[in-house]
Amino acid sequence: MILSLVLVALPTHAQVTDDQIYSFIDDLFTPSTLSRRQQFDELKWFSEAAKPYAGMTIYVVSERIDTHEYEATALSRAFYELTGIKVIHELTGEDDLLRKLLAQSETGVNIYDAYVNDSDLIGTHYRSDQVVALSDFISGDGADVTLPTLDLDDFIGLRFTTAPDGKLYQLPDQQFANLYWFRYDWFNRKDLKQRFKSLYGYDLGVPLNWSAYEDIAEFFTVHVRELEGRRIWGHMDYGKNDPSLGWRISDAWLSMAGMGDVGLPNGIPVDDWGIRVEGCRPVGASVSRGGALDGPAAIYAINKFVDWFKYAPPEAPYLNFTEAGKWVSTGQIAQQIFWYTAFVAQASQPGLPIVNQDGTPKWRVAPSPLGVYWDDGMKSGYQDAGSWTILKSTPLERRKAAWLYAQFTVSKSVSLKKTIVGLTPIRKSDLFSDEMTRRAPQYGGLIEFYRSRGRDVWTPTGTNVPDYPRLSPLWWQHISKAVSGELKVQQVMANLASAMDEELAAIGKTSKSHCAPQLNLKVDPSIWLNRPGAPKAKRNERPPGKTVSYEESIRVWQ
Amino acid sequence: MKSPFVCGNKPLLLWCLVVCLAQIGTARTWAAGEDNMIHLVAYPDPPYMIDQEGSARGLVIDVVTLLFKRTDLPFNIAFMPPKRALQTALFSKNHCVLAIERSQERESQFAWVSPLVISRHALYKKNTSKIELLTLGDARRYAIGSFLGSGAGEYLEGRGFNVDLVADDDLNLKKLRAGRIDLWATDTISVSWHNQFAQQDVELALVFLTTLRSMGCHLSINPDWIARLHEELLLMYKDGSINLIYEKYSSEGFKWLLNDAGD
């Protein structure tokens, strides 16, 4: 016998008063790029537009980073008090989020009313016919619940969430990049500079190429060995057999080596996954089909990734992304080539060995050094853009309520404060605000990066990838064999490229999209390697190291 | 003298031949039966999987029974402790474990049919409690009871909440009533099961987590069968069959996903 339990009766939500709105502004949403009156008008709009949905409970999900913790605790509460819409904002890992999104798409069960999903899935979303095109929604069914002051032009990441059909499928909620991180104080020590110059023949500075990165790694790990009474290393990374190993590589490591083609945002026609497209159709990842995943540049990239563990703490190959992220704060790492700026807030905490007494960091972020296959005009690194995504299986009324919450979390009333908390900027107006200018010295170069054209050259996974959830596990399942030494790198990449092609073919068989994969016939790889562009023929993989000063390195972004 | 059991004389030879052929035929049938049977291993997890005096019942059991009926695939169900169930499916041909989390770590270890169960997990309180929760963060100051292996308890623990994990969820209800814990973390289907004899003294305070559980099959199973089962499962969601099953265990069918008085 099933007894019905008493469900909690929420207190009836009373319409928010103007005084209460001003209290929100003063207590929660200061600073802002809007005037107090403009904030009031925006928040008042939300309370009015949400009236038909007051009393509803909506379910949304995002990954677990500081920005979303802030949304799940502070913003969802404020939204409820403003509108009467209760938000269950769940936090989970990105792979779990993807599984739920896929389950909702396949079953039609409305598990969540909205997702904050990485724009890496743009290729999946626009082909699947399961995702609401927000640009259509804004001008159609969602017109009455679209914030008049949303100002889409103010978003820095809209290009990542717009598909080849010109439609906006996702709205960015948070963005972070993967940059080069280093100990600015150590790199400026006279004694270390002199010693490096005498050993390597050029100046210690921000490495421009992988040869310099390698020299600097060796310098700190092998020659310097100890600073401030502690063992130090010239490199940090992670290689645990775990999903985060996949992202370590697919978050543009191969493009940083120079594997793909020139052309933004991802390389045209061969992208940072080594997948070639013709028109909008993926035609292969293997070199024999015109892709680049098993070509010389990809092999070089993985060889370096595996080889450089010798310069990292011995635990590094056994750590995942979260575990490795804590190392930089210990004060024992001199540089890290692959570092997500989502960790900036953590690495800026007062009292850490990597933070000065005045609160400024001893470290900086700078453009990532690039491999020998990189050519001018290519993307330079990875940027994550966690973006609001609504599925067509969400009933219209719930879609509208979820859209209100989504817009609230990215509105100008809220966004500057949110950016200060999580350091994952999404709006130009926030980045160029006086408040950000004042705070920039605390963030080690993050604001300088985001104010520059660098934010357009570090990009997420793009539209060449037709089914991200299906293809992404291939990375860690194969690369792990290179890390463990079970297989040689060349074999690993051959296997990975072959597996990628098999999956592309399988996707092509069942997809109804006119942009579904259709594999090229296999030919002798040398035919493709001898043509201009990707896949690229072998180059000299150990040119002399080159460095620049930090100040020069960020001028590149201007 | 020739032994009567030596197949030297014709009648005996014929008899031997008949018996031998019969044995081979039987053996072939037996091997084919074993190869074609899918062995499902479940673990006690009421109301999802219940081993009642040799008879299997529960929400997950209802789902898979209907699923296999619709796909016309032969199966049987056995119960064992959770870890053994997982190991059995991992290492024994033609075995599948029921209702486990499909994590990326496990992704390549099994062939999957999913999602078998979608659960909402919530914090429950005594209806005399003054606790008000608007966000999960509001629960940080309270003692939360959950059970080991629920997923929800481990999730809360991983996020730094004050969680007391026990082996039996019934105990959590008792502890809640006795005031030894402030909140009980469990799923919205299970809570009815555990409270089935009682008292309207427990109420939902906040939903905080959704989980999916799936059937994980040994990689030896015919991939066409896996595909058939998966496709049929999706059809069962779309044609309302799964919803009807949920209605048996929660009065509102798929509205259990909404789980809010306001909807």
Image (spheres, rainbow, N blue to C red):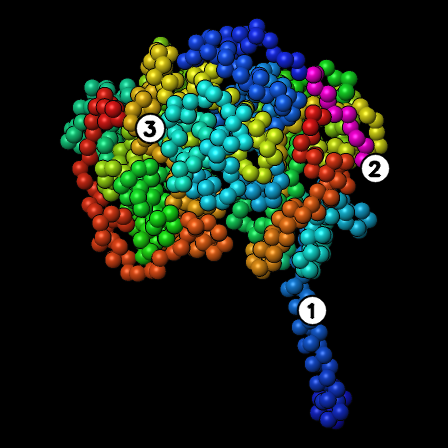
State the quadrant of the C terminus of chain B. Answer: top right
Label 1 – label 3 distance at C-alpha = 65 Å
Q: Is residue A74 visible?
A: no
Label 2 marks a residue whose chain is: A
> Image height check: is A7 above or below A167?
above
- Where does label 2 land, which residue? A1
- Where does label 1 land, which residue? B30
Membership of A247 in magenta stretch: no
**Hey, what amino acid is under mark 1?**
Trp
> Image height check: is A171 above or below B179?
below
Residue shown at 65% from the left, 46% from the top? B237
Q: Nearer the viewer, residue B146 or B62?
A: B62
Label 3 marks a residue whose chain is: A
Which residues are drawn in magenta? A1-12
Tag in front: 3 or 2: 3
Majority secondary structure of magenta residues = loop
